[in-house]
Image (cartoon, coloured by chain):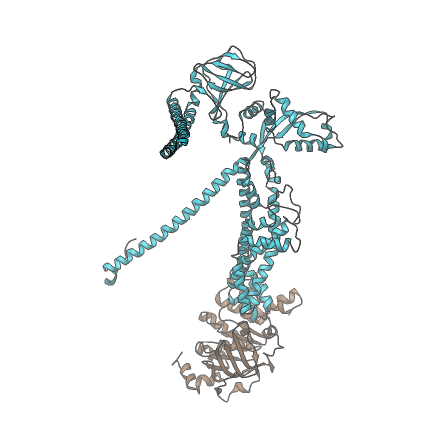
Chain colours: A cyan, B brown
Amino acid sequence: MTDFVALSKHHTSEAAAKQLRRRRFAEWRLKAYGVLAIFLSGLALVTLLWTVIGNATGVVREHYVTLPVALPADEIDPDNMIAADFGGIAKTALRSHFPHVTGRKEKRALNDVISSGAAFELREEVVKDNSLIGQRIEYRFLASDVTDLYLKGEYGAMDLQPSLGALEIQEADEKGYVFGGDPQLFAPALPLIQAELLKRAARLDQLAMQEANGVRVFEERLLEATEETRAEIEGQITARRAKMEKAIADAQAFRAAATQDRYVGEMDEFFPSLFIKAKGGWAKITEITETGGKAAFVKPVEVTGALAEGDYQFFMNARGEVTRKIKDNHVIWVEDLRADGRIDSNFNWRFFTAGDSREPEQAGIWGALVGSALTMLVTFFLAFPVGVLSAIYLEEFAPRNRLTDFVEVNINNLAAVPSIVFGLLGLSVFLGVFGVPRSAPLAGGIVLALMSLPTIIIASRAAIRAVPPSIRDAALGLGASRLQTSFHHVLPLAMPGILTGSIIAMAQALGETAPLIMIGMVAFIVDIPDGIFDSASVLPVQVFRWADLPERAFEARTAAAIVVLLVFLVLMNALAVFLRKRFERRW
Amino acid sequence: MATATKKSPTKKKAPVRAKRHMSVTDSMPSKIVAKDVHVFYADNEAIKGVDVNIPEKAVTAFIGPSGCGKSTFLRAINRMNDTIDICRMTGLIELDGQDIYDPAIDPVQLRAQVGMVFQKPNPFPKSIYDNVAYGPKIHGLTSSKSDLDDLVEWALQRAGLWDEVKDRMDQPGTGLSGGQQQRLCIARAVAVQPTVILMDEPCSALDPIATDRIEDLIHELRENFTLVIVTHSMAQAERVSQKTCYFHLGHLVEQGDTKQIFKNPQDERTRDYIFGRIG
C-alpha cells in the first residue's frame, strides 16, 4: 500500500501514522486468521475423506474361486431341495480339489477358503436349473472374507525371492525334508528376523526388570524374617535371581544373534514365513541350520536328490503367521488356486444389492439404504407439513400473548433435547401405547420427525419473517385474505429458506443413531424392507453395528457404508439446492 | 388487533376542532366520513380525534410533518392497521354511509373497495400480467381467461403502462424501473375495481419525470375513483388535490379546498408549515 501523498498536517503526525499501521496490521491479521481457518477446515475435510474413502476401497472388488463340483443325483432331490446338503457338496468339492489335506483341523480350515454362504447360492443355482443335477460343473464359489482380504494384499504377499544355486535334499519323509544350500538364500529375511530378535530381547529385558524388582522386595522381607520363613524367602530370592540372570543372558544372546550376518535357529510363527515350492509341492522352512535348513510340507510332494536352481522357487511372506488371520496352509491353497487360474474377481455389486449378513463377504448396504430412504420419507411427510404449517400459524396468524410465547420457548428448547430422549418417547408412546411395529421405518420416521420438527419450525419461521412486509401489505391491500397472503405470496418467497432448514433437519435425522436404538432399529435384519411396516435398519445404525464386529473385512465395509451415507447426504442436499433454485425469486 | 369500539377513550380531552373554510369540496357528496377517530399504538395515541369528510370523485391530500399521523389515518380507512397487533382504534369511519369497523364487515371485502398504493413500489415477484391479474383472480371478477386479459389490459391502460409493457407481460414486475413499478402497483389496485384508492406518498421514491406521470395519472383516475393521497410535497398537494387536510401531531388542524388552504391558511401551524417555516 502506498500512502496518499496530499495529506493534511493532521494526518501526518506520528500518532496518526501509528494508528494507520495498527489498522492495516489488524486487517492483515484478520485476513490471515480467516485463511488459516479455511485451510485447517479444508485439511480436516480432506483427511476425513481420504481416510474413509481409502478404507472403503477394500470393498470395490470381490473374489471368486472356481471349483469343479459334482451334483450327485442321489443326494439332491429336485422336489425337496431344502433337504439337500449343499454345504457338504461344497466341502466335498474343496476336499477333492485338495486331496492332500487330511487332518481334521486342516479340513476345517480348508472350508474357510470359500464363503459359507456360497453353498446357498449354489442351491439357488440348482433350483433355477434342475438339469444340473447329476452333472459335474465348474462353479464360481464366493471367496471367504479371509481369502478375499489375502488376495487384496491385506495379509502381506508371497514375494518370490531369488533362488541361489542348487538345493541338496539330504533327508526326506512324508512330513518334510532337510536340505543343504547356500546360506545366502535367507538373506532377504535377515533384517526381519533381526528385528524380531531385538523385540524378543526387549521383552526379556522387561522380564528381567520384573524379576529384579521381585528380588529386591524379598530381600527387604528377609530383614524382618523369622526363622521359619527365612528358608522360604531365601528360596524365592534364589529362584528369582536365577530367572533374572537367565532372562538377561537370553536377551544378550538374542542381541548377539541379531548382530550376526546370518541367522541359525528355529523359524517359529513370529518370524517371516519362508516357503520352497518344488515340483508342485510346498514346504515351509521350520529351521535354518549351518548348512541349509529344515522344511515341513504344506503340500507334500516326493523330492529326492538335488533341486537345480530352476527346479524350485523360494518365497517369503514378510508378515509372521501370528500377525495375520490367514494361516500358511490357507495361503498355499489360495496360491495354488491362483496359479491354476481358478481365482477371479469382479466389481462388488453384491455390496450394493445385498442386505446385512454375519459373513462380511456377503454383507451389503442395500437393506440399510432402503431402510434409511423409507425412514426419511416418513420423517419428511410428517415433519415438513406439520413444521411449515406451525411456522405459518405462529408467524402469520397467532396473536402475541403468553401462550404463544410459551409455545415458542418450548419449541426452541425442544431443538436442544438430546435425541435419545425422543427415542424413549417413541418407545413408550408409539410402540407402547399405539402399537407401531418395532424396528419399522414407520416408528423410526415418527421419532425422527419429532426430532426434526423444532429445527424445521425455527428455520421456517426465520424464513417467513425474512419476507419483506411490503409484500404482505401489497396482497392485503388488494383485498387478499390473510390465508391467501400467506399461501400465495409469503410461503413461496420463504420456500428457499424453509427448504434449506428442512434439509438440514433431514440430514441430521439421516445421521441419527441414538433414538433408533431405543425403538429396535439396531436389530440384525437380513431382508430388504418391503415397506414402512417391515423391520429395517438404517445407514448410521449399520455403520455402528459393522464397526463393532470383529471380522477384519467389516472394517472396509464400515468405511464403505460411511461413503454410501455421505453420498446419500450429498444427493439429498443436491435435491435441496435444486429445489431452492427453482423456488428462488428476487423481490 | 385493532378493535373498533364506539366508546370514547376513558380520558377524554376537549376535541381540537379543525378550522373550517366555506368551501367547494364541502358541498360535494362525501364518500368517506370520519368522526372522532382515535388510533393508538399500544399506549401511544397517534391520531387524537379526527373528523373529516372525503369528497367523492375528487383528490384529497393529507399533508403535514413526519410522524403527524397522516399515514396512520390513511391506513385506518381500509383497515390495514388491523394487521398491526398493538394498534387500536376508536371512533367512526363510514364508507358510503356504512361503518367499516362494524364487526360484521369483512375487511377483505372492504379492501376490495378501498385499494391502496404504497410509498415504496412493491410489485409481487411475479410476471407483470400476474401482478395485475392477481386481484381480479382472488375476487372472481372475471369468468374467462379472455375477460381477465381484457381487464388486465384495461387496468394497465388506466395506469398508463400498457404501451410500455404490452410486449413483455410475462417478465417479472420487479424488473421494471421505479416509476413503472409504481404505475404497475396503481394498475394492480385499479384492476380490482375499487371505488376509493389510497396512496401513501406514492412519489416519494421517484424522480421528477416519473412523479409527473403519476400526477397526470391521478388527474385521470379522479374521473372514476375517489382518491386520498398522503404527500410530503406541498407543491404536489397543490397540483393534484381538490381538498387538503393538514395534520399536526395527531390532530387534523385544518381542512378545506386546496386553493384556499394554500392561499390563505387559517391556522398558524398550517401557515408555518405551508410557507416553509417548519417541516
> Which percent across, then down, holds residue A440?
64, 49
In the picture as drawn, the residue positioned furthest to the top comes out as A305
Q: Is residue A537 above or below residue A276?
A: below
Judge by depth and name the residue closer to the eye, A347 or A125: A125
**Residue A578 showing in the rendered view:** no
Judge by depth and name the residue closer to the eye, B110 or A483: A483
Q: Is residue A391 above or below residue A202?
A: below
Count of all numbered marks drawn on residues in the image = 0
> Which percent across, then down, holds residue A462?
51, 61
In the picture as drawn, the residue positioned furthest to the right comes out as A79
Judge by depth and name the residue closer to the eye, A364 or A257: A257
Choose top left, top right, bottom left or bottom right for residue B7.
bottom right
In the picture as drawn, the residue positioned furthest to the bottom comes out as B22
Q: Is residue A315 above or below residue A549?
A: above
Q: Residue at x 50, y 28 (%)?
A: A322
**Residue A427 showing in the rendered view:** yes
Direction from residue B5 to residue B233 in the image, left or right: left
Q: Residue at x 55, y 15 (%)?
A: A279
Q: Is residue A380 above or below residue A566?
A: below
> Which percent across, then down, holds residue A169?
50, 12
Judge by depth and name the residue closer to the eye, A569 or A264: A264
In the picture as drawn, the residue positioned furthest to the front comes out as A227
Choose top left, top right, bottom left or bottom right for residue A44.
top left
